[in-house]
Amino acid sequence: MSELIHVDATPQKRLFLSIIADYDIKTAICELVDNAIDHWIDGGRRNILKIGVRVNLDRQTIVISDNAGGVSKDDLQLLVAPGASREKIQEGLIGNFGVGGKRAGIALGELVEIKTRHKQGKTFEFELSDKWLSQNDWNVDVYESENIAANTTTVRISKMRQGFDADGVKSLRKHLAETYGKFISDKCRLEFNGEHVEAVAFDQWAFPPDYSPVQHTGEIGPFGVDAKKVKVKITGGLTFDRDPSDRNYGVYFYCNERLVLSHEKSHHVGFMQKFAGVPHPDASLCRVIVELTGMPTQMPWNSSKSGINWSHPAYLEIREEIFALATRYSTISRRLKGDREGEVYAYKSGNLSTKKLKPGLTGKEIVALPVPRGRQKNYPERILDQNEALFRKKPWVRGLIEAVGLAEIIFRRRYQTKNRVALIVLDSTLEISLKEYLVHQKKKYFSDSQIADLFKSRDKVLKEIEALTKVPKRDLDLARHYANLRNKLIHERATVNILDEDIITYKAVTDRIVERLFGADLD
C-alpha cells in the first residue's frame, strides 16, 4: 500500500509581497475605501457613511477613516488574513477576493497602524509592518487602546514605499471623485484633506436629432457558483464634456456602482480598424458607459478592481454590444467634427432611447441605426437629389440637370482654360433646354424640320421662348449676349477672354431659365 503524505499548504508571508507589486497609491487607497463602503452596505446603509482620506505631503503619511461600524473582536481576522471575508456575500458589494484591504496598506508603506471600534465597544489596535512580514508566524498582536469614536475604523500608513508629490495628491482626489461618483451623496460623504469631494459623473450626453444616446438594459448570466443573474445597462452616445487634455472618451465600466475602468480605447472595446477605428481626437465625442450590478463574484473586474478581465464570461456576453455602440458613435463623432457647436453641443437635453438588451445579438441592430453621411453632398449630387421627383415626370430633364452640375465642377477646377470649357457646356445646356421645352410644350406644335430651321438662329429660338413663356426679358437678353460670346470663341479668329464673372452670371441665367421652363430646383 502506498504511503500517504501530508504537505503543509500554509502560505508564506512573501505571498503578501507578490500580490502588492501592481498597486499604486490610487488602487491601494481605493481598496480601503471599498472596505468601508462594503461594511456600510453589509450593515444595511442605516447611517450616513463618512469616509475621510488625509494625505500629508510633508510627512508622507496617509490616513483613511470611516464610521461604517467598526470591526468586532470576533471579526478582526477579516482585517489581516489573506482570503478571509464575510461569510455572507450579497449583491452590490465591492469586495470579493478577501485580499484587497490587507495588501493595500502594506503596498503603500512599511508601517500600517489600524484602530477599530465596533459600536460602543472597546477600541482595538494592531499594526502590520515589514518586521511582521519578515517573521514566519502569522499571528498579529492586538491591543486594547484608548477609545476612538464609536463605529469607527482608521488606517494610518507611514514609511511610504513610494513617495508622492503635489501632482500625485491632486490626481488622487480626482480619481476618488470619479471612482465613487455614484456613491457620493447625502447618505455617503467622502472627504479629502478635510474638504468635501464632489461626485464626478460621465453621463453628460448630447441629444442631436437622429443621433441621441441609446441605452440597452437587461440581464446576463449567471456565471460560476452564484446562481444569480447580473443586471446590465449599456449606454452609448455623444458627450458634450469633451476634454482634449484628459482624452476622456471611449468606454467606461462600472461594477456595482464603482468605476473600475475609464476612457478605455483599446481593441478590447472595439477601437480598431473596421469597428470604432483607432483612437483619434475626431472620435472624442464618443462615450459608452457599461454598468453591471449583481453578486461581486459575478463581476468581470480584476483582483485590484483597476481593470476588466477581458476573458470573463460576463464581459464576453456583452462585448458585441459594446463594439457596436462604440463603432456607431465614433463614426458619428468623426462625421460631425466640422460643426460640433451647431451639430452636437447645442443639444444638451433630450430623451434617452431605451431598448431591451439582447446579449450577443444586438450588434447589427445598433449599427443599422442612422449615422450622418461621411461628407456633405456636393452641388451636382444635391441638385440631382432635389429633382428626383421631377425626373419621374419629365425624364428628359435629367440630362440638363446633370450638365448644369458638370459646368459647376469644371468652373471649380484650377485649369487655366476652365472658363472656356464651362462656357461651352453652359451654352449647349441652355440650347438643349430650349429645344426640349419647344418639343414638349403643348401650346404650339413644332415639326422636326421646323425645329431644325429654328435652331439655325439663337435669336429666333429666344423669340419663340419669349412668346410662349414668362421668362423675364433681361434673362433672355443675357442669354443672347453669352451665345454671341460663345460664337466669338468658336467661330472668330481672335480668342476672347472669358472671365469668372461671365461664367457666374451665365450659370445663374441658365439656372433661372431651366427652373422657369421645367419647374426644376437648382438652389
Image (spheres, rainbow, N blue to C red):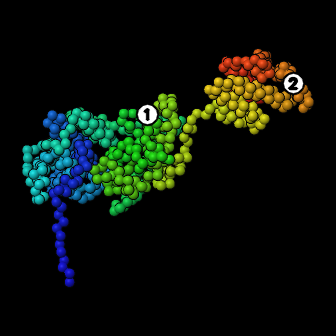
| Residue farthest to the bottom, as pictured | 1
Quadrant (top left/top right/bottom left/bottom right) for the N terminus: bottom left
Left or right: 292 with respect to 451? left
**Does residue 511 appear in the picture of this structure?**
no
**Residue 145 at x, y percent in the picture:** 8, 47
For residue 448, above or below residue 465: below
Local packing at callout 2 (Cα closer than 10 Å; few below 14, some 14-19, many 20+) is few
- Residue located beneath label 2 in the image: 456
Q: Amino acid at mark 2?
A: Lys
Query: Is residue 143 toward the left or the right of residue 496 in the image?
Result: left
Going by the numbered disc 1, the residue's amino acid type is Phe
Q: From mark 2 to mark 1, how far is it between C-alphas?
A: 64 Å
Residue at mark 1: 240
Q: Looking at the picture, how far across and down is residue 190, in whole percent?
A: 25, 39
Find residue 334 and report its horizontal and vertical position in percent.
49, 37
Mark 2 and mark 1 lie on one chain; the one further toward the N terminus is: 1
Q: Quadrant of the C terminus?
A: top right
Q: Quadrant of residue 437?
A: top right
> Which element is circle 2 on?
loop
